[in-house]
Image (cartoon, rainbow, N blue to C red):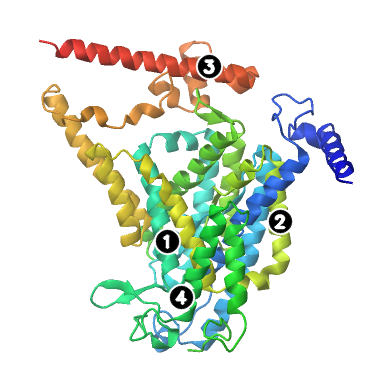
């Protein structure tokens, strides 16, 4: 019986591969050019399911955080205060907004993931990005609309960002712009956002409530039951005795243990477990019933920050997943289908604004599907189909309490912070700007200001060192200048000209009357040839660096 089932699966894989579907997605055995070696239909389905299970926490977590904006709900703020927390009608409206956010998250994630699979043929799923959700909610709109920009204007900024992204993607500038950012700042931004998300997950509004406000130290260990918090969310008594807080800690431990054993869907299992425990009434951890208890300058700051953060977030994820999946061309530092992928992302950003969400972004959790063997866009289509099915279970996702999703935020934060080891800590000009990005984002509760602090300090420190070195003709330089991260390491072997978008290189070469150099995709080069080119490029770069080092040593000799 087992053998017959295996044979049936193999027969299905062969039939699909030899069909038009298999040819479109370049399955192994389809006869298409540049087939994805080892790709099988059933493996793609399994990979897409693994991606969904890994990233499905975004359905409830996104809705929970975005509901903190207040959405389109409003109240008499003179009567009920700036946050409207004491208005029963406002609280009821928030529950409706939460359901709407779940539906919108599933819809946008479904559409964009399917488009990514069908058009770009990449096993990368899209959904509202956690970092952008946090920035949209707590920095731009503010808790219950207490920020400087209204919810409606913030959505307008997201829509304009999507349109700008679409134009940049058509011109091929978007991936080029992401490559010119110093690597340490790119890494530090992801780490800072990870700590930011963990900080949110530790609080009570969208987390387990372990960290609360303090009049003397700003924050402190809280964990008290809700009835022992004042209007400023400060614990007045019974610290570390709240049942929901300890239930959230248990959820974090469960998710971490399952993740250690590489259990698929560990985050979702932990969220569901804690939620089920929190649903029954009459317990100390119950989530039911609920208690009854901008100007233009800011708009443009939000728009610019959305642009920059999304470029780092989504573009970095696309490049890292392409490299993980084996689609990256080391010579050109580009991947197959990148133009279509960026266009799909920009369309998804526009759709996000239409559905009232923060911008969508490529998800790193797509790596779970790739690890399962996903190589084509069929996996993304499967993930999108799972989001469609999730639409019919919106009430279940809406009933997940914050202390169930808080552990997911903490775990995601720890995952994002893992890249901190890749920062160049040996050189002060790279380390200080990166460190400022990491600490300003969570402590300043602003992703945008953290990025600005990093770029500003990077330019100030390294600009001053560069000017002094030029003025003194390299007589006054830092002793360990050789440890500095090479900012131009993103350049191709053609030098600065090589980092320009391909269409711009074609235009310049045409004006100069020079022949246009074809890309690997245009030449239809196979994978072995590409690898040989990248090896040759690396050897050439190494030879040039060694020659440059020898020349420096010879000039330093008396």
81 or 213: nearer the viewer: 213
- Give the image location of residue 204, x and y in percent: 43, 74
Give the residue displayed 62% in from the left and 33% down from the top: 337
Mark 3–mark 2 CB contact (< 8 Å): no
Residue 62 seen in this snapshot = yes
Q: Nearer the viewer, mark 4 or mark 1?
A: 4
- Give the image location of residue 97, x and y in percent: 58, 73
Q: Residue 198 has which mark?
A: 1
Q: Which residue is mark 2?
A: 386
Q: Viewed as shown, does residue 482 lie left or right of 151?
A: left
- Give the image location of residue 104, x and y in percent: 63, 63
Mark 4–mark 1 CB contact (< 8 Å): no
Secondary structure under badge 1? helix
Q: Residue 533 has which mark?
A: 3
Pointer 2 or 1: first along the chain: 1
Pointer 3 or 1: first along the chain: 1
Q: Which residue is mark 4?
A: 245
């Amino acid at each position: 019986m087992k053998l017959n089932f295996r044979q049936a699966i193999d027969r299905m894989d062969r039939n699909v591969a030899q069909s038009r579907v298999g040819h479109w997605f370049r399955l192994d055995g389809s006869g298409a050019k540049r087939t994805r070696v080892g790709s099988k239909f059933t493996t793609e389905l399994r990979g897409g399911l693994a991606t969904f299970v890994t990233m499905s926490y975004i359905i409830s977590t996104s809705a929970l955080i975005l509901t903190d904006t207040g959405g389109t709900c409003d109240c008499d703020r003179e009567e009920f205060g700036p946050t409207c927390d004491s208005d029963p009608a406002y609280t009821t409206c928030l529950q409706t907004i939460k359901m709407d956010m779940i539906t919108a998250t599933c819809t946008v994630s479904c559409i964009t993931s399917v488009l990514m699979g069908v058009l770009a043929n990449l096993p990368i799923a899209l959904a509202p990005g956690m970092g952008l959700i946090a920035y949209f909610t707590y920095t731009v709109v503010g808790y219950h609309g207490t920020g400087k920009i209204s919810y409606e204007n913030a959505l307008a900024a997201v829509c304009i960002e999507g349109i700008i992204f679409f134009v940049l993607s058509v011109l091929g500038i978007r991936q080029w712009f992401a490559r010119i950012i110093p690597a340490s700042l790119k890494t530090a931004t992801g780490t800072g956002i990870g700590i930011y998300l963990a900080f949110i997950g530790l609080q009570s509004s969208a987390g387990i409530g372990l960290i609360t406000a303090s009049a003397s130290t700003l924050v402190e260990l809280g964990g008290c039951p809700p009835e022992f918090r004042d209007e400023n969310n400060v614990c007045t008594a019974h610290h570390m005795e709240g049942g929901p807080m300890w239930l959230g800690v248990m959820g974090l431990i469960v998710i971490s243990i399952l993740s250690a054993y590489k259990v698929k869907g560990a985050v979702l299992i932990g969220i569901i477990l804690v939620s089920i425990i929190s649903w029954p009434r009459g317990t100390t951890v119950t989530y039911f019933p609920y208690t009854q208890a901008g100007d233009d300058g800011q708009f443009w700051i939000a728009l610019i920050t959305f642009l920059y953060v999304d470029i780092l977030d989504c573009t970095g994820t696309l490049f890292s997943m392409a490299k993980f999946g084996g689609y990256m061309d080391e010579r050109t530092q580009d991947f197959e289908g990148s133009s279509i992928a960026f266009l799909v992302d920009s369309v998804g950003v526009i759709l996000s604004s239409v559905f009232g969400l923060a911008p969508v972004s490529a998800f790193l959790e797509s790596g779970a599907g790739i690890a399962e063997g996903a190589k084509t866009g069929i996996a993304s289509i499967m993930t999108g189909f799972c989001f469609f099915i999730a639409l019919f279970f919106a009430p279940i996702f809406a009933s997940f309490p914050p202390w169930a999703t808080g552990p997911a935020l903490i775990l995601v934060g720890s995952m994002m912070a893992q890249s901190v080891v890749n920062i160049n800590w040996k050189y002060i000009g790279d380390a200080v700007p990166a460190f400022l990005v990491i600490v300003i984002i969570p402590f300043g509760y602003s992703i945008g200001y953290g990025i600005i602090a990093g770029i500003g300090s990077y330019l100030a420190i390294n600009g001053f060192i560069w000017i002094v070195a030029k003025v003194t003709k390299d007589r006054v330089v830092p002793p360990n200048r050789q440890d500095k991260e090479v900012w131009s390491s993103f350049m191709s072997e053609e030098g600065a000209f090589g980092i320009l978008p391909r269409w711009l290189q074609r235009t310049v070469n045409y004006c100069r009357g020079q022949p246009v150099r074809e890309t690997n995709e245009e030449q239809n080069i196979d994978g072995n040839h590409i690898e040989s080119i990248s090896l040759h490029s690396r050897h050439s770069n190494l030879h040039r660096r060694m020659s440059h080092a020898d020349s420096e040593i010879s000039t330093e000799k008396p």
